[in-house]
Amino acid sequence: MTQQTGGPGPAVDKTVANQSRIFLQLGTLWRMARASGEGGRLLWLIAGLVTVIGATAYAQIRLNAWNEPFYDAINRRDIPAFGFQLGVYGIIAGTLLVLNVSQTWLNLMMKLKLREILTRDLFQQWLAPRRAFLIANAGPIGVNPDQRIHEDARRFTELSTDLGVGLFQATLLLVSFIGVLWSLSAGVSFTFEGASFVVPGYMVWSALLYAGLASLASWRLGKPLVDLNAEHYARESDVRFSLGRVNQNCDGIAVYRGEAQERDRLNMEFDRLLEVMRRLVSATTRLAWVTAGYGWFTIVAPVIIAAPAYFAGNLTFGGLLMAVGAFTQVQQSLRWFVDNANLIADWKATLLRVSEFRRALIQIDLVERDARRIEITEAKDRIVLDDLRVLLPPGPSSLSERRLEIGPGERVVIVGGPSSGKTSLFRALAGLWPWGTGRVELSAEGLMFMPKHPYLPGGSLRDILAYPYAPDTFRDEDYRAALTSMGIAHLIPTLDTTAQWEKELSDPEQQGLAFARLLLHKPRWVVIDTAIDTLPPQSRRALFDALRKELPRTSILAISGVEHKYDFFDRLIGLSLHSGNAGAVGLSPNSV
């Protein structure tokens, strides 16, 4: 977003745009809740909270009215009346206790339900076909999605409940106690230079002016906290990501003796976080001057406001305390914004981070509408690459043959040199890299893609081999045969063992497990991204023998960086990068 400077106009426009964006995102989230099927339960929780808060407000009015007879009884030294009012207090306090516990339960259930709805929706949007990959290559919006889905969503739902309930409760108490305060202000006259005059509801106007000035000051000082909180969350996620990366690669770091460099990188990320936190501390401290000062002066402000009526004889001592209580309730309701200015800024920051991430996930599919996208269609019993050119930042990558057609049982290898776009070609065939020209025809049934680096999902080895299907899809002897064919039969006894297999297994074992998955699934069509190159010679020969024996009718399109001397492949096709031509606009070189 481009920032404008040079006058109040653009700043006002930006503020209005931000407010409109917030209301738009709230509407989107509400429609999302309704679409989730949990809208009815959410409405019941809201109705319960409204009922409990309304009953609590009424009980607090009764408690405030109880002050006058109770303290007047003390002032008269009337023991029977004193005892009776204690009984009344017990009933009111007991009712408020039940209401407070009920409100606590409803608050917690509201947070739980909101987080359930939002997190499950983000799971669904993020893991829609191709979206996780596309958003990861879409710039800053795709950095550390775990932070937005987990921490930001949690914080947003908790703040939404606390602030929403607090605002409604403050509004209800304000409406209720303004009437009490207005009636207590009636008939109070002021004398100035011998002339008497009456200000109707002067206590109400005093409370409004008092809280309004403090709210205005807190809004001006708390406004910068929105952007600071959003940046703070981003820097926290960067530090956590860097720590996780070091933890996952601690063995490689130790082997290369790279601890000092990694420590410097962590310190650099942490310094960026500390810089934001220092600015956040300064902004919060400036806001604390208003909130803390307001709180301390509030101790005596109600007494000062009510004192003229008491000294004029219009209020008894009990009436004075009742007026002080009503004034306190009114100004506490009005100071809701003052007390929550920091939390409101935090809420707006998390709202925008979560909602913009969700919007980006939905809109990321629009990249495939670009005029220069690769057309992918379904074919029957063949794979066709017709005039395919994959656009990369340095330039387009293309095959040595303009049209490549692979029929059932054929085995073709595409060989390209370093940085020729081999992985991008694989992603284009898989529908993950839409930038380019030409047409790809793929069989709709029995198609399997194998990336360069194997993915080992959590669970047992049986879960990993069956992925993405259920383990009981295949027979036990099929699992054993697949592992034996790839020379990793020693893993058979641990088929049902759950562990962090990406750490337990060596790189050749992990790659062998990926090819054992291929032998187990027995697809009719396979596209492989340089994974064969990573196998040691013995495992490679075992793989070729197993494919010839067990999958003789399976068509294989392999992408490689070396020309194999084995007679496994029927044809060899070249892949080259035409540098110097216009590449894809806005693509990340890191993803090539």
Image: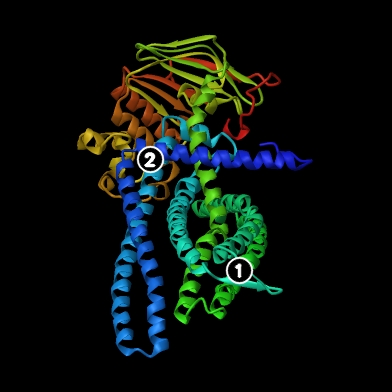
Image position, residue 279 (x, y; %): 67, 58
Instruction: Please tell me which residue is depicted at 54% across the width and 78% down the height of the picture.
Output: 310
Q: How many marks?
A: 2
Instruction: Please tell me which residue is depicted at 30% across the width and 25% down the height of the picture.
Output: 522
Tell me, yes or no, if residue 265 can be seen here: no
Residue at the spot of label 1: 294
Image position, residue 478 (x, y; %): 23, 33
- In the image, residue 523 sits, relative to residue 36, either above or below, namely above
Of the pair 400 and 444, the residue shown nearer to us: 444
- In the image, residue 249 sits, relative to residue 403, either above or below, namely below
Of the pair 501 and 91, the residue shown nearer to us: 91
Of the pair 128 and 69, the residue shown nearer to us: 69
- In the image, residue 40 sits, relative to residue 485, either above or below, namely below
Image position, residue 557 (x, y; %): 44, 20
Q: Does label 2 or label 1 sit earlier along the sequence?
A: 2
Quarter holding residue 124:
top left
Q: Residues within 10 Å of mark 2 (few under 14, many from 20)?
A: many
Of the pair 41 and 126, the residue shown nearer to us: 41
Q: Nearer the viewer, mark 2 or mark 1?
A: 1
Q: Residues within 10 Å of mark 1 (few under 14, many from 20)?
A: some
Determine whether, in the image, residue 359 is placed left or right of residue 14: left
Q: Which mark is on residue 33?
A: 2
CA–CA distance between discs 2 and 1? 38 Å
Q: Secondary structure at mark 2?
A: helix
